[in-house]
Image: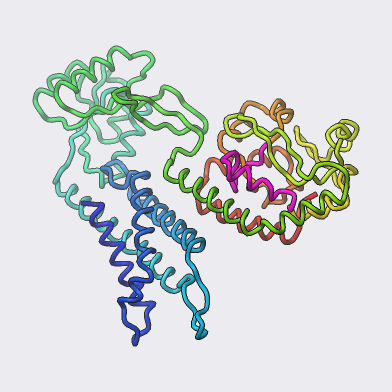
Amino acid sequence: MLAILDTACIVGAFATAIHWSTELYKPLLPEVRTNLLYLFVVILVWFAAAFERHLWSPTRRQDVIHYLATVTKAVGDACVFCVFVMVLFTRSGVTDDGQKFGGLDHTFLVVFCATTLIYLLTFRLSLRLIVRELRNLGVNSHRVLIVGANERTVHLIQVLKTQSGLGYTLEGVLDDEPGRCEETDATGVPYQGKIATLKERLIEGEIDEVYISLPVRSRYEEIQEIAHLCEGAGVPVHLVADLFPMRVATSRLMHLEDIPLLNLSTIPEAHGKVFMKRAMDFVGSTLLLIALAIPLMVLAILVKLDSKGPIFFLQERVGQNQRRFKMIKFRSMIVNAEEVQAALLEQNEMDGPVFKIKNDPRITRLGRFIRKYSLDEFPQLFNVWRGEMSLVGPRPPIPAEVEQYTWSQRRRLSIKPGMTGSWQVSGRNEVGFEEWVEMDLDYIDSWSIGLDLLILLKTFRAVVAGRGAS
């Protein structure tokens, strides 16, 4: 039902955009046919994003702000991907009689994206408010019993109480030591006896859900027995787990057939967005290689004429999950540059394992120019096309640099390396190694399609200005 109503909102936004962007004297049907592909793309990507972000799953435990932010991000993904597809595949030109055809209808697209966001947010928010009011009236209210009294229990009670839309009625706390319930009593949730009384409460049929807040490592068998009791009574049980307190990793429950798994990961787990990123990489690198074929051939000839040696410089780099690959660049240095580097180590201007110096004597005449405008990097489009790299991501290090990484710094190898990234658009060589790594880790933690597009735009500006390269 949610999928159908979401689709109705998008279709309504499409109709509104057609109405607003079409001049009064023009018929609507031709405009509908012209822009119908926009509608299909947005619906398709919205379905993928909504499924990935669990927007069609029960939302009883999700706060409204986070819920609306999730809806906004999903609509943003759909609109961004729609623009990307349309820019790449929409034909435009001029007819024999001088009339323009095709191209992006900016007015329609802006109105369509804006109204899609407004309609979906309005619908979803209205639905949540209606459901919340019904729960406040006692409709579909769930009676909750908490087993175990400790600091986590107090925090759990505070969270459940602050989210009135959850529709929970906190019946009380069970614990074998009443003295531990002083803090929970202060929250207004009363102590209701020892844990052994749980079976009676379940038999009486007064409880809809049970939360277990006992320490797992020391009370495992007891927790197992409680879970079996709840299972027998058909009452959902939730375990407040403290198995692995991690610094940056997020936890997610998943299943491998009938095997429950607790997934702890520091890398993006949104597979729909990862697929979109790979699609952008493949399509973008393909089109750029075609569009830049002649300029790249000219550069190849110039590199060959400028100095002795091969046209391309192939260097072993470390990619995602420490897989090694050959990164391709136009040769901008003398043939034995890596051997000469050993004699220049004292002049290194970068901290950490990275080697960089200004006025590097190993750079050729043409090399200095193509490095200033990052033209030597364009052959890496082949690495992107093959899936070894991405358009945006941490720069791939050489194996010798990785050997000097601290263990936490190796996390920057958890995603595909990129042709450009936060480092390149934030000062590039003026940024120290530690700050460089922090930028990469921040990118991994906050990654989104929109962030990639922003970095690509900033990269274009930096390349045109020749800023920060050497």
- In the rendered view, tell whether residue 135 sits above or below residue 396: below
Q: Disc count in the image?
A: 0
Q: Quadrant of residue 25?
A: bottom left
Residue, far front: 96
Where residue 260 appears, as percent x and y from the top left, is 33, 24
Indicate left or right for 49 with 435 as reference: left
Q: Quadrant of residue 290?
A: bottom right
Q: Quadrant of residue 19?
A: bottom left
- In the rendered view, tell whether residue 17 sits above or below residue 202: below
Which region of the structure is painted magenta? 375-396
Where residue 181 appears, as percent x and y from the top left, is 29, 25
Identify the residue at horizontal 25%, vertical 47% (top origin).
Answer: 165
Where residue 423 appears, as percent x and y from the top left, is 67, 46
Q: Per the image, is 98 magenta? A: no
Where residue 417 appears, as percent x and y from the top left, is 61, 40
Indicate left or right for 255 with 99 as reference: left
Residue, far bottom: 25
Identify the residue at horizontal 52%, vertical 84% (top origin).
Answer: 98
Which scheme is used to colour this image of the protein? Answer: rainbow
Q: Per the image, is 379 magenta? A: yes
Residue, far left: 204
Indicate left or right for 405 with 156 as reference: right
